[in-house]
Image (cartoon, helix red, strand yellow):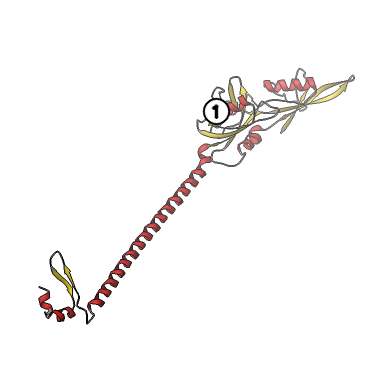
Amino acid sequence: MTASWWWTPTANKSSPSGQTIPVTRAPFRKAVRTALATTRVATTDLYRSESGRVHLDWVAPLVKEIDGRRQAVGAVILDTPVERIVFPLIQSWPTPSPSAETLLVRREGDSVLYLNELRHRQGTALLFSQALADRELPAARAVLAGTAQVIAGRDYRGVSVLAATRPVIGTPWHLVAKIDRDEVLSPLRKLVFWVSLVATSAVLVVALLIRLLWRQQLRTHQLELAAQSVEKDRLLRFFFDLPFVGMAILSADHMRWLRFNDCLCEILGYPRENWST
């Protein structure tokens, strides 16, 4: 803070150093009059002076007993360097983020006035306002509600945001901390993407395993059928090769001998060449 002296109102209104103190700022003059009249510390609201600087002044009266009465004989003026300390502090809170921003706002008639420099719109402190009737605007809803709340809406850029608001006790100010909705949902979208990718991969792997298992079972079944067929042929050959039993297989449709053994040829007295015709 920078300090200067303000003595009781006189014709010259000068500081101890002889420099004339500017008194053209209405909020500043009002705070000085209040401090001198009440002998209590008075503060101004945030305001922009003719030089373009944003001010927040504290006026501490210098009180002296005169004829048994407490009277202010001067005052110490503390001018807070808002643009060098307060605004950077607000903009750096709560955490670093590509889109997060903290706003300080107050009601100005039928509008909501932005008190601090906006991250996405520079040079607008105490110069930029929007209509209170815009219920999508978190700053407007904060001023109208007057209570702490968590809301979703669109900020001064028209971008969808999630915001938390809280009134600043003892002041007409409201604090609005907001962040772009897309930034909040980006990790969730990435998580959904990877979960979907893993789930899809798992389904494909399971489907591939089921197909391989089915093919393995089908091959096993075919091998079992082939083994059974080989066993049947082996048993059939065993009976056909018996030396004392004549056996033959006849096709009823074509009346042809399909299979016969040598013992049958010997029993009937026909050579094998005659049976095959």
Q: Nearer the viewer, residue 174 or 189?
A: 189
User: What amino acid type is highlighted by mark number 1?
Assistant: Leu
Q: Is residue 141 visible?
A: yes
Which residue is more in the foreground, 130 or 30?
130
Report which residue position mark 1 lands on: 137
Position of residue 169 relative to residue 206, above or below, is: above
Q: Quadrant of residue 233?
A: bottom left
Work out which quarter of the rendered image holds the N terminus and state it: top right
Horizontal relation, residue 59 to residue 189: left or right: right
Seen from this angle, which residue lies furthest right? 68
Q: Quadrant of the C terminus?
A: bottom left
| Residue 51 seen in this snapshot | no
Q: Nearer the viewer, residue 180 or 264?
A: 264
Instruction: Indicate the position of residue 150 as horizontal and vertical percent values.
Output: 59, 33
The quarter holding residue 62 reads: top right
Task: Please give left or right for residue 173 compared with residue 267 in the image.
Answer: right
The residue sitting at 53% across, 34% down in the picture is 161
Q: Nearer the viewer, residue 12 or 223?
A: 223
Label 1: which secondary element: loop
Image coordinates of residue 238 in percent, x first then y, are 26, 77
Residue 100 locus on image (x, y percent): 56, 38
Count the numbered circles shown. Answer: 1
Relative to 29, residue 162 above or below? below
Q: Residue at x 55, y 28 (%)?
A: 137
Whole-percent x and y of residue 160?
Answer: 51, 33
Residue at x 51% of width, y 44% of height: 188
Q: Is residue 203 above or below residue 37?
A: below
* Label 1, residues with CA under 10 Å away: few <14, some 14-19, many ≥20: many
Q: Quadrant of residue 57?
A: top right
